[in-house]
């Protein structure tokens, strides 16, 4: 208990004095995860809207796949991406292995199905209500998908926050393709694992406090947006 108290005190002190190593790790984590969540949103939101506004053979199977990918194991994503970007892989010439770019792709692959599934869920309800009117007006599929997305700003922000929360808490995939290189690819989650194994509990706990705080902020924001979206419109 005394060791935990000392580590907690040192962790809080590091946060208050904005320790350089801690700030650098948190900054990299935010850049990578925000970029990955943005990538997942740009690809996933239109996909979810299109799945809501179109009917085609195999649509049901694609919806099942998108929802199944919500539970995609991060280590599998890391393994597949490692094989693709390693020197002997088909994308090895791009030099992405052990770079922040590979970490963004890994986290983006995990974020995309979250955004697609949540966007589809929202747009499906809107399509059931307004789809007939859009068809009567002669609105094309792509345009209809954009209209559906424009009608649901709060749920879409919630989908982005959910994707960001998944990305910033991920460790397995980015460890495999990022390498946990100090000052270059070391994020909060990978640093917590490393520093704990090395016995530097203060830095690990400090990063853990920051990570938990960010998670709580994201969860609170998503909850608030959902409550606002559920309120009856005047």
Image (cartoon, grey):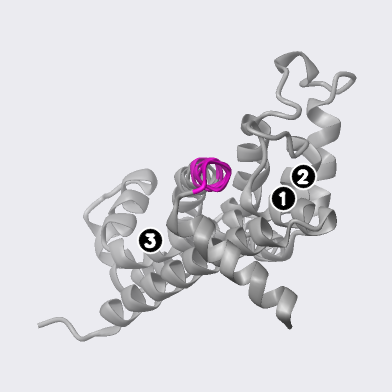
Quarter of the view holding residue 63: bottom right
Secondary structure state at the residue bearing disc 1: helix
The dot on residue 175 is 2
- The percent coordinates of residue 216 (x first, y second) are 47, 72
Q: Residue 64: within the magenta?
A: no
- The percent coordinates of residue 218 (x first, y second) are 44, 67
Q: Is residue 121 above or below residue 105?
A: below
Secondary structure state at the residue bearing disc 2: helix
- The percent coordinates of residue 224 (x first, y second) are 33, 77
- Report the front residue among 178 and 95: 178
Mark closer to the chain start, 2 or 1:
2
Who's the residue at 31% across and 66% down the image? Answer: 154
143 left or right of 103 in image: left
Who's the residue at 28% across and 68% down the image? Answer: 130
Q: Which residue is mark 1?
A: 190
Q: Which residues are magenta?
A: 19-32
Residue 94, visible in the rendered structure = yes
Q: Main secondary structure of the magenta part?
A: helix
Q: Is residue 100 above or below residue 53?
A: above
Mark closer to the chain start, 2 or 3:
3
- The percent coordinates of residue 137 (x first, y second) are 21, 54
Look at the image and tell me in which quarter the N terminus lies. bottom right
Q: Which residue is mark 3?
A: 156
**Residues at marks 2 and 3 touching, judged by CB atoms closer than 8 Å:** no
Look at the image and tell me in which quarter the C terminus lies. bottom left
**Residues at marks 2 and 1 touching, judged by CB atoms closer than 8 Å:** yes
């Amino acid at each position: 208990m005394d060791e935990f108290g000392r580590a907690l005190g040192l962790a809080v002190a590091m946060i208050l004095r904005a320790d350089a190593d801690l700030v650098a790790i948190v900054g990299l984590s935010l850049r990578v995860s925000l970029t990955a969540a943005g990538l997942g949103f740009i690809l996933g939101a239109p996909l979810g809207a299109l799945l809501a506004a179109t009917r085609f053979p195999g649509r049901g199977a694609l919806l099942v796949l998108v929802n199944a990918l919500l539970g995609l194991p991060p280590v599998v994503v890391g393994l597949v991406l490692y094989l693709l970007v390693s020197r002997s892989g088909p994308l090895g010439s791009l030099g992405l292995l052990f770079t922040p770019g590979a970490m963004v792709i890994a986290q983006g692959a995990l974020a995309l199905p979250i955004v697609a599934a949540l966007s589809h869920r929202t747009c499906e309800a809107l399509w059931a209500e307004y789809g007939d009117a859009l068809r009567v007006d002669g609105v094309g599929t792509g345009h209809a998908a954009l209209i559906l997305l424009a009608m649901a700003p709060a749920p879409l922000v919630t989908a982005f926050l959910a994707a960001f929360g998944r990305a910033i808490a991920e460790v397995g995939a980015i460890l495999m393709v990022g390498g946990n290189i100090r000052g270059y690819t070391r994020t909060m989650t990978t640093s917590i694992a490393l520093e704990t194994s090395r016995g530097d509990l203060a830095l690990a706990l400090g990063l853990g406090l920051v990570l938990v705080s960010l998670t709580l902020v994201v969860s609170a924001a998503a909850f608030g947006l959902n409550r606002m979206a559920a309120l009856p419109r005047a």
